[in-house]
Image (cartoon, rainbow, N blue to C red):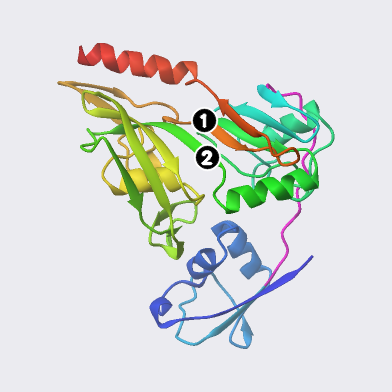
Amino acid sequence: MVVTHTFVVPESSVGDRLDLFLVRQMPDWSRSQIQRLIRDGLVTVGSEPAKKGGEVLTSGTSIIVRAEHEASQATAEDLPLTVLYEDADLLVVNKAAGMVVHVGAGVKSGTLVNALLHHIAALSTAGGEERPGIVHRLDKMTSGLVVVAKNDIAHRRLSEQFKSREVHKTYMALVHGRVAADSGEIAKPVGRDPYRRTRMKVGGLAPRAALTKYRVVRRIGHFTLVEAMPQTGRTHQIRVHLSSIGHPVVGDTTYGAPAKLRFGTGEESTLPRTFLHAAKLAFAHPITNARLQFEAPLPVELAAFLAHLASRES
C-alpha cells in the first residue's frame, strides 16, 4: 500500500539537505531508502520532483513523499528459546542478548518472533504480520524477560496494563562511575535524535515524558550496579536516562560508554554487549487477573564480568 506523507519545511530546517530532513521526519526509513525514493521520482519539492538528496530546503516549502514499505511476514525458525512460563493465553520468555525481538527493516530472520513461531503456531495478530504476539520489546543487546500474547484478547489487555503502568519491570544495569545517591529518580523527556535516527536523546524530536527510578545494589571500584525501574516505556529510556546523569551503561558505546575499560595503567575492551538485563516482571494475568511475577538471574557472561571487576578491584 502506498502512503502519502506531506511536510512543510519550518524555519528551523532552512538550509538542511532534503534527504536528512526526511530521515528526521520518517524515522522508520533509512537514509539510503529515502535517497532511493528521491531517485525514483517519488518525492516532490514544491511543484517539481526532487532531483537529488542534497537539495537545500527553504522555509515554507511543501514536500510530498509517496512511499511504500514492503511488509515482512515472520516465518518459523528452529532457534534456541528459553520459556519460563506458558499457558493458553501467554508465554514469558528469557531473551538472550544479541537477539532482535521481531523482523523489520533489514532484519528478516533470527528474531524472537521467528523462534516463537517454531515453538507455537498460534500467536496474537494485534501486532501485525511482523510482530505476532509481541506486546513489548527489549533492545537487541538487552537480555531478560519478555511477555508474549497467544491471542488478541490477551494482547489487548496486556497492552492496556503497560499503558496504564500496571506492569512492574526491574532491570539490572552496571554503569560507569560511582553513583552518589543510594536511590533516586530521573524525570527527563525522551525523543528521537534529530541527526542519528537510531538513537534517542533527552529532548529530541517529539519528546515524551519519561521517568526512571533507580536503586544502588553495589559499588565496585569505578562502577555501580543498579536496579532500574522504568515507570514509562520510551525507546532506550534506561540507557538514555543513565547516560544523561553521567553514568552510561557498561558496553553501551551508543550512549557514551567508553570502548575501553581502564584499570590502573592498563586497559581492556569493554563488554561486547550492554550490561542491561530485564530481571523482574510482574503483571496481572490478562484472563484470570491472578498476579504473576517472574525473575531471570543475570546471564553467565554478566555474572562473570562482575566477578572479574571485583577481582580487579580487590
Q: Which of 80 and 227 lies nearest the eye of the viewer?
A: 227
Q: Is residue 163 left or right of residue 307?
A: right
Q: Residues within 10 Å of mark 1 (few under 14, many from 20)?
A: some
- Say whether residue 189 is magenta: no
Identify the element where label 2 is drawn: strand
Which amino acid, by three-letter code, is at mark 1?
A: Lys
Which amino acid, by three-letter code, is at mark 2?
A: His
Contact check, label 1 and label 2, Cβ < 8 Å: yes
**Up-down relation of residue 249 to residue 235 (above or below):** above
Image quadrant of residue 28?
A: bottom right
Which quadrant is the C terminus positioned in? top left
Q: Cα distance, mark 1 to mark 2?
A: 8 Å
Find residue 280 and name its label. Answer: 1
**Up-down relation of residue 201 to residue 82 (above or below):** below
Identify the element where label 1 is drawn: strand
Q: Which of 80 and 178 lies nearest the eye of the viewer?
A: 178
Residue pointed to by mark 2 = 168
Q: Residue at x 56, y 42 (%)?
A: 167
